[in-house]
Image: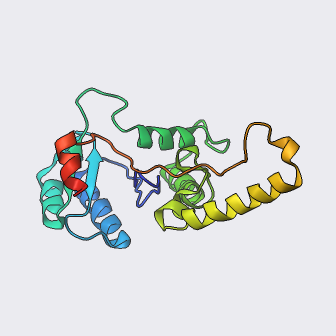
Amino acid sequence: MDIYSRYVVGWMLARAERAELSKRLIGESIAKQGVTKDQLTIHSDRGSPMIAKGVAHLLADLGVTKSLSRPHVSNDNPFSESQFRTFKYRPDFPDRFGSFEDGQAHCARFFPWYNDDHRHSGIGLHTPADVHYGRAEAIREQRGVVLLDAYAKHPERFVRKIPTPPVLPAVAWINQPGEEATDSLNR
C-alpha cells in the first residue's frame, strides 16, 4: 500500500507465509508501478518473510529502504490497519470463507473497489487511485466549482463560510525521520 494515496499497489493471498512469496509480491509490485532504484521505502512488520535474507537481498538490489515496525506493537502501521478494518467491516465480508478460492475471489473484488471506488476521508474524499495517479487535484478543482455554484444559488445553506472541498494531505509518514533528516530531504 502506498501510504500517501492509500492505493494498494499489490496483494497476494497465500496458503502459507514464505519469504519466496514476499519476494515475488514485492518484485512484481515494484515492476508494475515502475518504481526506480532508491525511490521507495517499504514498511513492514518483523515477520520472518520480511526479514529473510532473500527479501533483504531483493530490497538491496532494488535500492529499497526498509522501515521495520517496533517489536510487539499492534498498531505499527495505521494506514494498513485502517485498510484492514475497511476490508473486515464491509457488508459482504463473510463470517467464514468456504475455501481458499472463496477468499481469493473476495480479495479480487475488494481491492479494485478499494482502489477505484472507495472515497477515503484521509485523502480528501478521493479514491486511492485518483490520488495515486495524480488526478485528485483536478477533481478537487471541479468539486470547488460545484460548491461555489451551490453557494451562489443557495448561500443560506452555508451559514459558516463559503464551502471548499477537503484538501489533500501534504505528506504521510510511518517512522518519520528526525528533523535533521527531514531538513536534508527538503533541500
Q: Nearer the viewer, residue 85 or 52?
A: 85
Taking the image as shown, residue 149 lies to the left or right of residue 125, namely right
* Residue at 56% across, 54% down: 114
* Residue at 22% across, 29% down: 71
Taking the image as shown, residue 118 lies to the left or right of residue 25, namely right
Could you say where residue 58 lies in the image, as x and y percent from the top left? 17, 62
Residue 83 against residue 128 in the figure, above or below: above
Q: Quadrant of residue 140?
A: bottom right
* Residue at 87% across, 42% down: 156
Taking the image as shown, residue 40 lies to the left or right of residue 127, namely left
Q: Nearer the viewer, residue 2 or 56?
A: 2
Colouring scheme, one of rainbow, by chain, secondary structure, one colour = rainbow
Q: Nearer the viewer, residue 34 or 140?
A: 140
Residue 147 against residue 33 in the figure, above or below: above
Taking the image as shown, residue 78 lies to the left or right of residue 89, namely left
Q: Residue furthest top?
A: 72
Could you say where residue 15 lies in the image, as x and y percent from the top left? 37, 49
Could you say where residue 158 lies in the image, as x and y percent from the top left? 80, 42
Could you say where residue 137 lies in the image, as x and y percent from the top left? 55, 63
**Quadrant containing the C terminus in the rendered view:** bottom left
* Residue at 48% across, 50% down: 100
Query: What number of labels is visible?
Result: 0
